[in-house]
Every structure is written in structure tokens, then in C-alpha cells.
Image: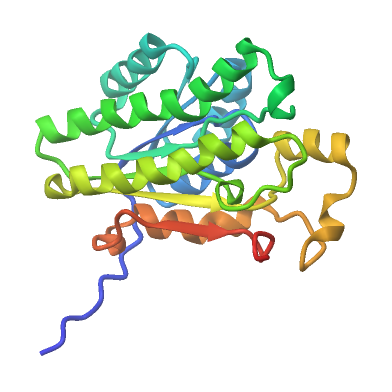
């Protein structure tokens, strides 16, 4: 007899951590996870902005704790996990969303910017994923990790984001490698590679480069809500056999 497919996307009882949650995609990720029943820990540099997100989630009947975190500081990242676990319990869903652009041609970047981009986009997410996984493994508990890469991992126009593209390509390989390493522990590691979506980062890009949407197949910048179904699929019980996968959600923008 053929087994019925698992279509469960209820996240009740799960504890989710979302970084870079003070605006844009991270804000939306936190809200959609809360809507599906997860308790939320949200982290970002701007704690005052997180308090607004916390209020929205709680007013909708959810549970949320907000924390300031500096993704370039390993201690800050580890302290975030420690505090969230103390307040909520073991994190079994991680959305590794924090990231910054470079907006400079490679030969014009100073060392401080190079370090900030590498540390925020790659080192910090690596440390955070390992910290969450370490605790899940110790407690023999399964989990879901979703790293946020970018379509820039696969295509680059040459307009001053070479390091950003490099770090996002590294996030893809990090996802694949950690998925293999942690598969036996029941920890699924996947990634989403978004194209151009409405966010503070995108606002800065369009201010610098003008109407980039005119070059896209559908001539638009996408709304964050269009990522909801992909995120929920990757963190839900229904995705038990999905690991080591990167899903491009780019509206055809990266097709060349």
C-alpha cells in the first residue's frame, strides 16, 4: 500500500530563531512562522525595531522574544542562542537570514568592509548554525535550518557586489556540506536563494543603480510574501526528506 504523503505544515510546539529580523525579509519570515504556530526568537542589531515586530506577533496571539545580536561577533552569536534557549527552550528551526551588501567594486573595498561582509554573511551564519545544531545533537532532537543565500550566488552583473556574490555562493556550499554532516542526526539544512525582493537592502540598491526591475523578465521587484510558501515547506514536518537543497525564488531574474 502506498503511504499517504505528509502534508503537515503546522509548526505548533516549534521554537524558531530568525536573524536579521528588524526589517524586510527577516521581519516577514518571523511573522509567517509565528502565524503557523511557532514560538519566535528574533535577533538583529537594532533592538528597537525588533520590539515592534515582537509587539505585532504578540498582539496576534503569538510568543516572541527579541535580542540584539552582532553577527560579526562570535560571542554575541553564541549568547543569542543561549538567551533564546533559556527563554523559550531548544531552537529547532533556524532561519539564518542576516546579511549585508558590499556595494563596491572589488578593488575599491577597504579591509573593514571586506571583514564586515565576510563576517556577517558567512562567518556569523556558520557559527550560528553550528551552535544550534550542537544543542539539537546533544538532545537527540531533529531540526530544520534554512540559510538565506541569494540569486547573486549564481549570477553577477559586475555592478559592484562581487564579495556579496562570493559570500552567498559560499552559503550555498555551506548548506550542502552541513546537510550531509548532520543528516544522521535528523537535522535538515536547506537554503533559499531569493532574487530582488522589497527590503532595505533593495531600497539602497535601487537608489544607487536606478530602476533595475526594467531588466527583469516580469519587470518587478517581488513582495516578501512570495517567499512564504517556500520557507514553510522547508521548515515543516512535510519536508522530512528535503535536505541539502537550495531553492531559487527569483521570478526568473537569474535566468540568462
Residue 77 occupies quadrant: top left
Query: What is the x, y in percent for residue 53?
Result: 58, 31
- Residue 13 shows in the view: no
Residue located 10% across and 30% down the image: 138
Q: 64 or 162, which is in the foreground? A: 162
- Residue 186 shows in the view: yes
Locate the N terminus and report the quarter of the image it occupies: bottom left
Residue 64 occupies quadrant: top left
Tell me, what colour scheme is on the image? rainbow
Please identify the residue farthest to the front as the structure is shown: 107
Query: What is the x, y in percent for residue 14?
Result: 29, 43
Query: What is the x, y in percent for residue 178?
Result: 27, 42
In the image, is 179 to the left or to the right of 45?
left
Query: What is the x, y in percent for residue 24?
Result: 65, 38
Residue 160 occupies quadrant: top right
Q: 34 or 191, which is in the foreground? A: 191
Above or below: residue 36 compared with residue 233: above
Residue located 47% across and 59% down the image: 247
In the image, is 166 to the left or to the right of 233?
right
Amino acid at each position: 500500500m502506498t503511504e499517504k504523503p505528509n502534508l503537515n505544515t503546522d509548526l505548533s510546539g516549534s521554537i524558531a530563531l530568525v536573524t536579521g529580523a528588524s526589517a524586510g525579509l527577516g521581519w516577514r519570515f518571523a511573522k509567517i512562522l509565528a502565524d503557523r504556530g511557532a514560538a519566535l526568537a528574533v535577533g538583529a542589531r537594532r533592538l528597537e525595531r525588533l520590539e515592534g515586530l515582537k509587539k505585532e506577533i504578540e498582539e496576534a496571539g503569538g510568543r516572541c522574544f527579541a535580542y540584539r545580536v552582532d553577527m560579526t561577533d562570535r560571542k554575541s552569536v553564541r549568547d543569542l542562542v543561549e538567551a533564546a534557549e533559556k527563554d523559550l527552550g531548544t531552537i529547532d528551526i533556524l532561519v539564518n537570514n542576516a546579511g549585508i551588501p558590499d556595494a563596491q567594486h572589488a578593488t575599491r573595498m577597504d579591509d573593514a568592509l571586506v571583514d564586515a561582509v565576510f563576517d556577517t554573511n558567512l562567518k556569523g551564519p556558520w557559527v550560528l548554525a553550528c551552535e544550534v545544531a550542537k544543542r539539537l545533537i546533544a538532545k537527540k532532537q531533529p531540526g530544520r535550518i534554512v540559510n538565506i543565500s541569494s540569486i547573486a550566488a549564481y549570477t553577477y552583473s559586475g555592478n559592484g557586489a562581487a564579495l556579496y556574490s562570493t559570500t552567498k555562493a559560499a552559503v550555498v556550499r555551506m548548506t550542502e556540506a552541513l546537510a550531509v554532516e548532520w543528516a544522521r542526526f535528523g537535522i535538515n539544512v536547506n537554503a533559499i536563494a531569493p532574487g530582488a525582493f522589497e527590503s532595505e537592502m533593495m531600497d539602497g540598491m535601487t537608489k544607487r543603480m536606478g530602476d533595475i526591475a526594467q531588466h527583469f523578465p516580469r519587470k518587478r521587484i517581488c513582495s516578501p510574501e512570495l517567499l512564504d510558501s517556500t520557507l514553510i515547506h522547508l521548515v515543516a514536518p512535510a519536508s522530512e526528506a528535503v535536505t541539502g537543497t537550495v531553492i531559487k525564488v527569483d521570478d526568473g531574474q537569474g535566468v540568462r
